[in-house]
Amino acid sequence: MAPAVDESKGRSVSYRSTLRLDLREIQGDLLIGMQKNAEQFIFFKINDVPRFKARTKEYLVRWMTNARTVQEREGRVEERRRRQQAKTEAWMASNLGFTRDGLTQLLGSNRPRLDPAFERGADHPETIAALNDPPRSKWLRNFQSDRVDGVFLITGPDPSFVSYHGNALRGCFEATINVVHSEMGKVRPGAQRGHEHFGFLDGISQPGIRGLTRPSKTIYRPDEGVPGQDLLWPGEFVFGYPGQHPDDPVKEGPAPPMAAPWMRNGSFMVFRRLEQKVPECRRFVAERAARLGMDRELLAARMVGRWKSGAPLELAPLRDNPGLGADAKRNNDFGFGDDPFQRKCPYAAHIRKVYPRDDTGDVAEAQRHRIIRAGIPFGPEVEPGETTTRQSRGLIFVCYQTSIERQFEFIQGRYANNPGFVEGKLRPGGGAVTPGFDPIIGQAPGSGAREMDEPYPDYPAGNRRTTLAIPHQFVKLTAAAYFFMPSISALRTVLTS
Ligand code: N7H
């Protein structure tokens, strides 16, 4: 449905749009994200298709959490925050997705073919080559050899609550499934809550969704949720709705193609188990900062584009500003266009690479490569004296989109892994810039060495040329899979009949 158009300004006034999302049909993790202190991922293989279908139908109503429920719960969390009540609810939520093999089990080999990247899969040699991922032989053993048909996501207030419910759910499915692998994610403790293992506040910047996210300034900034959060058409993330217009960041674009009507209200989920070498990364940053003659926290911030507090370098280029980092109305309200010489934030910094905003001059194009992230850390805290990683820890990266190729794979392959992106930038006195790899997630072929340009800040007006040589990756892929997260009614009908 088209939004009302304010002719005088030539802008859509999306908040008045009649666009309605069918939140009861959409799985809960997709748009808002299930409330989670802990999340278990149970990867399974279907053993007995007819009985699996019968069990899914039978237990689905009880287990599946839709986006409407998540939205109501979010409202209650907000209310509690307003009243400054500390209680956390013992909410359980669960979702279910299938790989291409899982869909084939359920629908037979003549089933419609979905997105080419989904059909290829994360473990296909072409995908691995395109993303410079480590070979499957280096992934977790269960992901190397076994077929994975589906995944249950179960969230709750703590790991024991979640594993209790995970076991109950496994019990319901009995021998109809074989659990291939199970992974528990949990938020970090105390003051590190909301921060990933390198120490940075995460979950700050997400796309806003037209028809769901309310603009905080309806008159002056109708196309943003909180300031800086551009509203996107929901078809970028859920099938059956208009997507972004290829030439205009605001106008309604076509709905993404669906290979079958039952894809409506569904989405693709990318799962990546990313191990983080935390002590090694800390040591590297400290050594290189000393060599460059700069503060180590500033160097770490220049690799990410934000300080650990969440404050963006574009607004706090030399010193952290924790108040800014914690303020959702200010911490995402910036662009990169007015920082043409990477004085405040390097072109290669993680957040500038993966979401260039206005950096390329083509905002409509930038908005076609967005994802909704819904990951969670895994693994224990670094122990005192752990100078070389002894225990596997990192980020269970999860993101949602309607085109894996145009969204996740584009960000990883064409932005983060591409030393030439962003193109066309010049030094202050002229001369082309090669920004280098995203130092956090960028991957060179064969896990080779990487470089990033300008780790040292020339802010406000210096002209010192520096390069950061990064011989090893501190983020390593150890498993990956692509899933389709169907609507609740597709789960009840087409996929289980
Ligand atoms: Fe990234 N980090 O701690 O350095 N990420 N990320 N990410 N990431 C973001 O804005 C991190 C990964 C995106 O809109 C922040 O919410 C780590 C992958 C996108 O401005 C921090 C890992 C991909 C954004 C990190 C990791 C992305 C984003 C700032 C792996 C996609 C939003 C907090 C272990 C291919 C950018 C925030 C925007 C933000 C970190 C993975 C993408 C701190 C450690 C694999 C789109």
Image (spheres, rainbow, N blue to C red):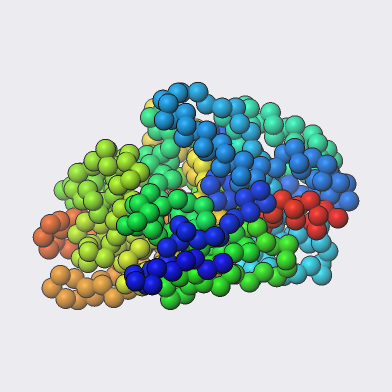
Left or right position of 465 against 328: left
Left or right position of 311 against 89: left
Name the spot of residue 409 as percent of width and height, x first. 52, 65
Q: What's the residue at 47%, 32% (across, down)?
A: 79
The reply to whether residue 142 is visible in this rendering is no
In the displayed structure, would residue 196 be above or below residue 137? above
In the displayed structure, would residue 132 be above or below residue 87? below
Q: Nearer the viewer, residue 447 or 245?
A: 245
What is the quadrant of residue 263 in the picture?
bottom right
Name the spot of residue 103 as percent of width and height, x first. 76, 59
Left or right position of 10 against 127: left
Which quadrant is home to the C terminus?
bottom right
Labels in figure, total: 0
Q: What's the residue at 52%, 38% (across, down)?
A: 74
In the displayed structure, would residue 251 be above or below residue 451? below
What is the quadrant of residue 389 in the picture?
top left
Which quadrant is home to the N terminus?
bottom right
The reply to whether residue 427 is visible in this rendering is yes
Q: Nearer the viewer, residue 393 or 203?
A: 203
Q: Nearer the viewer, residue 53 or 176?
A: 53
Name the spot of residue 443 as percent of width and height, x first. 44, 60
In the displayed structure, would residue 88 be above or below residue 30? above
Name the spot of residue 403 as percent of width and height, x first. 57, 66
Q: What's the residue at 32%, 41% (across, down)?
A: 327
Q: What's the residue at 81%, 55% (across, down)?
A: 493
Left or right position of 146 against 386: right
